[in-house]
Every structure is written in C-alpha cells, then in structure tokens.
Image (cartoon, helix red, strand yellow):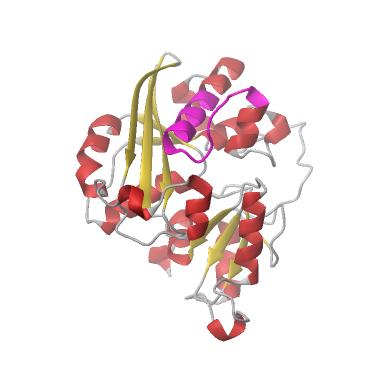
C-alpha cells in the first residue's frame, strides 16, 4: 500500500505564497522517501507567519521558486494518493500552479482530518487539528515544519487504517460520506449551521474587512460549503477570512481587531487559519459562480 503525504508553509495569508514544501512517501506503513524544500515565494513575509514557522525572507532569497520544483513534485505524486491535513495545503498547491500558469497536478487527494474524524468519535466534531490528533495518538513531530507535518498526516492515516480495518482505497470514498454514516444511533452533540455535505463541514468561519460580495452573501456561501458562520473570534473559530481593511477604522493599527485576536489564539495553540478572500473562494470552489 503506497501513498504520499504533503504539507506546505506560506509566507503570508495568501495560500499561494509557499515558502516550504514537504513530501513523504509511505509504503506498507513505513516512510521510504522524504522530500523537503525551502522555496522563494516571490512574495512578502508577514511577521506573524515568520513567528509561526521560523522561515524568513533571507533564508529563501537564493532558494528555488515553485516552477523550478514543480516537475519534481509532478513526478512524485501524479496518479498517486496524496494525504493532506485540512483543505489548505491542497488548495495552496492549486493556487501556486495557477499563479505560475502551470497545469493542475493530477492525483487523488485524501484529507487526514476527514479520516480521523470518521475513525475516532472523540474528535468527530472538534479537536481534530494536526497537533491534537498527534497528541492523542502519541505521534511526536515538530509542528509547522512542512516535512514534519506531512509525515504526521501520513501517520494519522496509517493509524486509522490499522484501527478501522478500512483500506486506503475505501477511505477515499468513506471520507466523502457523512461522519455518522453506518452509525444511525449516534447523534451530533453540536449543532452546525453549515451544510453537512459541504467540503468545509465542521469549520467555524469569521470574516473581517470589506469583501467583494456582501457579508450576507459570503456567509451564505460559507454555510453552503459546510461552515458555521459567526461574527466574533473565539476559541471555536477555525478560519478567519481577510477582506480589504479600512485604515481609518483600524485605530492606528495595521491589522483589524479580529486578526489580532486570531493571531493570539494561534499563538496559544488553537487550530485557526488566517486566509485571504480569494483563497476562501478557492476553498469553497465557488469563485467562478459569482
């Protein structure tokens, strides 16, 4: 049984600003190949992102750019199952391909978070961040290093296969089904406003700044994609979408109150991701419908 696991780190809230990529190849549950590369994203480095992963602009100044490693990535994962944790890394690769006018990578993506949520009932509704799952399973890793995160995601899938008895190919289909499929006696303890069949079901999202659509329309799109939409940043939030900021409303700061609060929660270990509006539309796959 062979599969790959992939993770990226980004220079700023734009998901296409990949500054590190890590790929691990698994065969019969063992790691048989590792690939780790720092990249020059040809973009600015947000101090907050640097604080999280420790990669600075000076470290990647002479590093390869995404088009230079694209062929190597293509050779590894084309036609194979590729594990990622949550939608962001998959979307980042797609956004980077679009940024440089490169063909989309053809592979079978499998989200380790979806696999984990369908394997362990304790984390079916919350607590399914990469670090929380690894703590639960006893997987040691250095978080926010692309290769370490990729390996951790790959190991989670192997743990799930061993526990459930469901093979890799079957997990590809099972991950698309309702979490409680086959367990009619189990009831959800938490009510989600989002569409349970949406690609982001279980996420809690907050918007800040001026968007290209009305806030009501953005909330509707998010709910259709599975998100629970709320107005305030709190520990339950998992996504903050950044719109254009009105400088006059920032009270002399360069970030909104919501973004500052979100960054504080991330520093405290909460599984919250800050993304741009464009990346949000890529995640919900509705950009071309607007």
In the rendered image, the residue lying farthest to the front is 58
Q: Where is residue 134 in the image (x, y as percent from the top left)?
A: 61, 29
Residue stretch in magenta: 136-157
Q: In which quarter of the image is the N terminus?
A: top left
For residue 87, say whether it is visible.
no
Q: Does the magenta stretch include residue 186?
A: no
Q: Residue at x 60, y 48 (%)?
A: 201
Q: Which of 255 and 172 is in front in this view?
A: 255
Q: Position of residue 44 (x, y in %)?
A: 37, 62
> Where 116 falls versus 59 (above or below)?
above
> Where 274 falls versus 201 (above or below)?
below
Toward which corner of the image does residue 160 lie, by quadrant? Answer: top right
Image side of residue 105 versus residue 173, left or right: left
Q: Nearer the viewer, residue 176 or 118?
A: 118
Q: Residue at x 52, y 52 (%)?
A: 51
Image side of residue 261 versus residue 160, left or right: right
Q: Position of residue 7 (x, y in %)?
A: 43, 39
For residue 194, say whether it is visible.
yes
Q: Nearer the viewer, residue 131 or 285?
A: 131
Q: Residue at x 59, y 56 (%)?
A: 239
> Where 260 falls versus 70 (above or below)?
below
Q: Is residue 137 magenta?
A: yes
């Amino acid at each position: 049984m062979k599969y790959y696991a992939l993770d990226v780190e980004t220079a700023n809230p734009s998901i296409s600003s990949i500054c590190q990529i890590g790929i691990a190849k698994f065969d019969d549950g063992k790691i048989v190949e590792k690939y780790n590369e720092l990249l020059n994203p040809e973009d600015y480095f947000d101090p907050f992102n640097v604080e999280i992963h420790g990669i600075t602009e000076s470290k990647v100044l002479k590093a390869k750019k995404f088009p230079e490693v694209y062929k190597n990535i293509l050779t590894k994962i084309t036609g194979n199952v590729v594990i990622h944790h949550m939608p962001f890394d998959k979307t980042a690769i797609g956004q980077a391909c679009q940024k440089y006018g490169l063909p989309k990578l053809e592979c079978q993506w499998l989200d380790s978070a979806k696999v984990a949520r369908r394997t362990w009932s304790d984390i079916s509704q919350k607590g399914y961040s990469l670090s929380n799952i690894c703590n639960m399973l006893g997987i040691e890793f250095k978080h926010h290093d692309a290769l370490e995160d990729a390996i951790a995601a790959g190991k989670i899938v192997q743990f799930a296969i061993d526990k459930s008895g469901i093979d890799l190919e079957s997990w590809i289909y099972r991950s698309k089904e309702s979490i409680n499929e086959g367990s009619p006696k189990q009831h959800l303890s938490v009510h989600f406003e989002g569409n349970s069949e949406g690609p982001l079901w279980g996420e809690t999202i907050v918007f800040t700044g001026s968007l290209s659509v009305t806030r009501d329309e953005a909330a509707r799109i998010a709910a259709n994609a599975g998100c629970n939409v709320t107005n305030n940043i709190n520990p339950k939030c998992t996504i903050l979408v950044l719109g254009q900021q009105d400088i006059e409303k920032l009270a002399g700061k360069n970030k909104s109150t919501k973004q500052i609060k979100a960054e504080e929660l991330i520093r405290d270990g909460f599984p919250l991701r800050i993304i741009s509006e464009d990346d949000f539309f890529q995640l919900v796959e509705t950009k071309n419908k607007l």
